[in-house]
């Protein structure tokens, strides 16, 4: 990749289900000097996401009567990291960069889903095209009810989530049978994370998904699970990413590892200015919902799970995307009253 020739007019990136901050940060670091050397150069950045169709189709079993949640193979972390990358690109220059996003075929369920996420709305001059690779007809899960599209929070919104966001959250909570006490607690987690991004991150983006982690049928193997309840095998994914400062700068630390250590030990940069910040988020997700929290800042990543262990790693290379990416994953079986919901339905 280092030795490849970069055209004066076009820079191509093939996205995958594994595109992360390290990979996309590397591309960002190569594009920035191209713009600074020649202020009149215009570059088309081609982001090819056509392979996401195969990720969607990998879990093709579908039952419209009981399966409204998003498929388990959907590359949510990659989609969010690409969102961060597009925002960082569009912030470099209004005049020199033209971003082209290549999606799967226009009638594919993955394309309709990506459009629902509003990923392309991050591009200041939207330039969409679609793959012409032939694909079989695919099914569209109930995205309207189990997806909260990318929503900006910052000075333009006075640091508040929109009324549309809260309306979408209520629809998502209804689809997941959220218990009342958990519905309020999770809403507070989302608002706390959004306030983090607004207070010290220069603003940010928030999105949520309900994604099914298991299928009730498998026609290729001929076994069908009786009385399969999708919600019992589904997780709520909360993604929040800020657009400027990393954790080290926000916490006044020399590196991201030390900063992450502080917040996992209960110290917040917002304790003196209101709010409880990351410690409150981690406590609610881990202890109340038996969920998992992933924090990515700079090239450092830490995963915190209910078993008390921490798993950490560094992205390859020395470049990465700006800001902080928080992901909280909570099992629906814990935060929902599924049995009561089904009893009422009957």
Image (cartoon, rainbow, N blue to C red):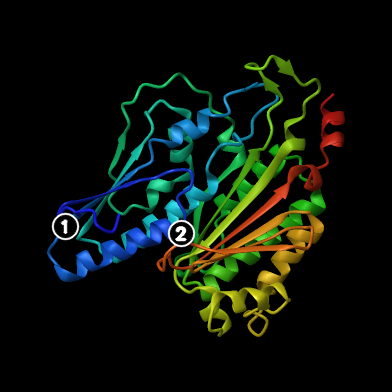
In front: 82, or 277?
Answer: 82
For the point 79% across and 42% down, which residue is it?
Answer: 333
Identify residue for label 1.
42
CA neighbours of label 2 inside 10 A, class few (<14), some (14 to 19), many (20+): many
Quadrant including the N terminus: bottom left
State whether residue 108 is above or below residue 205: above
Give residue 271's position: percent from left, percent from top: 68, 81
How many numbered circles are shown?
2
Identify residue for label 2.
21
Q: Secondary structure at mark 1?
A: loop
Q: Earlier in the sequence, mark 2 or mark 1?
A: 2
Q: Is residue 8 left or right of residue 161?
A: left
Q: Which mark is residue 119?
A: none
Give residue 163's position: percent from left, percent from top: 57, 54
Q: Secondary structure at mark 2?
A: helix
Quadrant including the C terminus: top right
For the point 49% across and 52% down, which residue is it?
Answer: 80
Give residue 83's position: percent from left, percent from top: 43, 53
Q: Is residue 163 left or right of residue 280?
A: left
- Spatial distance from mark 2 to mark 1, Cα to Cα? 25 Å
């Amino acid at each position: 990749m280092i030795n490849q020739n970069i055209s004066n007019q076009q820079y191509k990136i093939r996205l995958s289900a594994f595109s992360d901050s390290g990979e996309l940060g590397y591309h960002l670091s190569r594009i920035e000097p191209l713009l600074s050397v020649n202020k009149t150069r215009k570059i088309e950045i081609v982001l090819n996401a056509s392979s996401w169709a195969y990720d969607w189709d990998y879990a093709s079993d579908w039952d419209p009567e009981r399966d409204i949640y998003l498929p388990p193979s959907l590359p949510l972390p990659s989609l969010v990291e690409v969102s961060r990358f597009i925002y960082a690109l569009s912030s470099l220059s209004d005049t020199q960069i033209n971003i082209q996003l290549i999606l799967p075929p226009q009638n594919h369920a993955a394309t309709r889903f990506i459009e629902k996420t509003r990923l392309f709305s991050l591009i200041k001059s939207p330039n969409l095209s679609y793959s012409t690779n032939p694909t079989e007809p695919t099914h569209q899960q109930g995205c309207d009810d189990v997806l909260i599209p990318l929503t900006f929070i910052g000075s333009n919104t006075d640091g508040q989530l929109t009324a549309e966001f809260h309306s979408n959250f209520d629809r998502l909570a209804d689809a997941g049978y959220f218990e009342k006490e958990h519905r309020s607690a999770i809403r507070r987690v989302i608002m706390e994370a959004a306030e983090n991004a607004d207070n010290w991150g220069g603003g940010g983006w928030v999105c949520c998904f309900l994604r099914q982690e298991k299928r009730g049928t498998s026609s290729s193997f001929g076994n069908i699970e009786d009385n399969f309840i999708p919600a019992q095998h589904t997780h709520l994914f909360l993604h929040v990413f800020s657009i400027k400062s990393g954790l080290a700068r926000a916490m006044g630390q020399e590196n991201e590892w030390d900063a992450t250590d502080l917040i996992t030990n209960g110290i917040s940069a917002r304790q003196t200015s209101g709010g409880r910040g990351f410690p409150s988020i981690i406590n609610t997700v881990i202890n109340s919902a038996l969920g998992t929290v992933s924090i990515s800042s700079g090239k450092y990543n830490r995963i915190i799970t209910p078993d008390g262990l921490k798993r950490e790693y560094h992205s390859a290379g020395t470049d990465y995307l700006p800001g902080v990416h928080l992901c909280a994953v909570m099992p629906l079986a814990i935060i929902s009253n599924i049995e009561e919901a089904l009893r009422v339905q009957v």
